[in-house]
Amino acid sequence: MEKITLIASTTMGLESIVAQELKKLGYKDINTLNGKVEFTGTYRDICKGNINLRCADRLYVKMGEFKATTQTELFDGIKNIGWEKIMPIDANFPISWISTVKSELNSERKSQASIKKAIATRLEEKYKTTELLERGAKYAVKVQINKNNVVVMIDTSGEGLNKRGYRAINNLASIKETLAAGLVLIARWDGYKPLIDPTCGTGTILIEAAMIARNIAPGANRKFESEKWDVIPSEFWIEERDEAYSREDNDKKIEIYGSDIDGEIIKVAKENAKLAGVEDDIVFEQRHLLEVENYIKAEKGTIICNPPYGERMGEKEDAIKTTRILGDVCRRFPKWNYYVISSLGADRHKNGIKFEEIFGQKFDKNRKLYNGGIMCYYYQFFGNRKNVFVKNRL
């Protein structure tokens, strides 16, 4: 079967996690870059990747890479790519995204026109036609131009891979599913100890955790744009979905608890869990943050949460107050691991606020991540250690 290069795009900070996912799926030729991970596969792996990857944003076929400083060089480079190997004569190929960074090709409009014309010219020559109707399947072309280096891709996913299909209400401000899965994987929670999110909101972190513990493939029950492509036999999709279903673990005993002060949000969380098929694995309750310890008795476990950031005017003080209370609550679980994603800074460079002085304890590790375009840190505190309190706590 023909080898192709695939690109899994990802939120900055999750590249290594996506690379680990790919290794677990059996891939070896993996190259981790900023915001994406490249790997070698086949057309069948388009199915496997879309169905199974938890933290990637989209999956692309890499069509080519070359240098270009002029529109003529861009046209020639695009025209030299073998588009006919993947696109049929009736392919719909919008040029849906062009990104340029420090490049001499700084006109998106001109570049988009050059790319469209070059692909059309190539297909017209190969199919011996003077008219391309573009009434067939969609092959959305994405182009990145960084320092005159051009990377050309086709989107295989359609809707982003975060679209699992379990959001009962889509317009609520919730953490992205792919990022939530990343938080769980970074925490290395595997389902054998209790997990709590005391600021759970609509339940995304806990739902992703339950799917990880059960080994439920995130894309098994949704459709992808490339399912309409002629180069991918329909049996590939059927077989990869069947393989994903066969790996599900329905026997593990899982303890997951989520609470939030907002009762209406808890109702949404329960509905989301039901749509995801994990409603029996998560206990959602309306509770104040300070009440968490009243219903958790295990000696060891994990807390993962995404408390309010207070990015809007007038909300910063509330976010600081919540973080301070969260620190007090977490220290009541001295042998637990706890993980907090927050836009409050690891140092004083952002708004003069230092997270550990609010939380009241020094973190063991942190990782820079982006949540909805907001730069955050994922603070990690490991159990079985002496509580290191911060002097002069805010």
Image: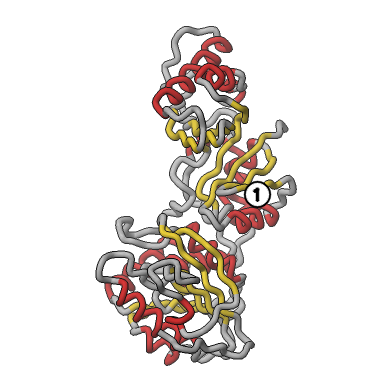
For residue 3, side relative to residue 365 (left or right): right
**Quadrant hosting residue 81:** top right
Mark 1 neighbour density, 10 Å: few (under 14) some (14–19) many (20 or more): some
Seen as rendered, the residue at the extreme left is 314
* Residue 251 in view of the camera: no
Seen from the viewer's position, the closer of residues 117 and 69 is 69
Describe the colour scheme in one phrase: secondary structure
**Quadrant hosting residue 327:** bottom left
x and y percent of residue 188 in the render?
62, 70
Quarter of the image with the N terminus in it: top right
Q: What residue lies at 50% left-to-right and 64% top-to-bottom?
A: 208
For residue 253, side relative to residue 161 (left or right): right
Q: Is residue 279 above or below residue 334?
A: above
Residue type marked 1: Thr
Q: What residue lies at 59% left-to-right and 88% top-to-bottom?
A: 335
Seen from the viewer's position, the closer of residues 146 and 92 is 146
Quarter of the image with the C terminus in it: bottom left
Seen from the viewer's position, the closer of residues 204 and 48 is 204
For residue 149, side relative to residue 390 (left or right): right
Number of numbered callouts drawn = 1
* Residue 341 in view of the camera: yes
x and y percent of residue 255 in the render?
52, 79
Disc 1: which residue: 32
Q: What residue lies at 52% left-to-right and 35% top-to-bottom?
A: 144
Seen as rendered, the residue at the extreme right is 28
Q: In this view, does 22 lie above or below 59?
A: below
x and y percent of residue 223 in the render?
47, 44
Q: Is residue 317 above or below residue 112?
A: below
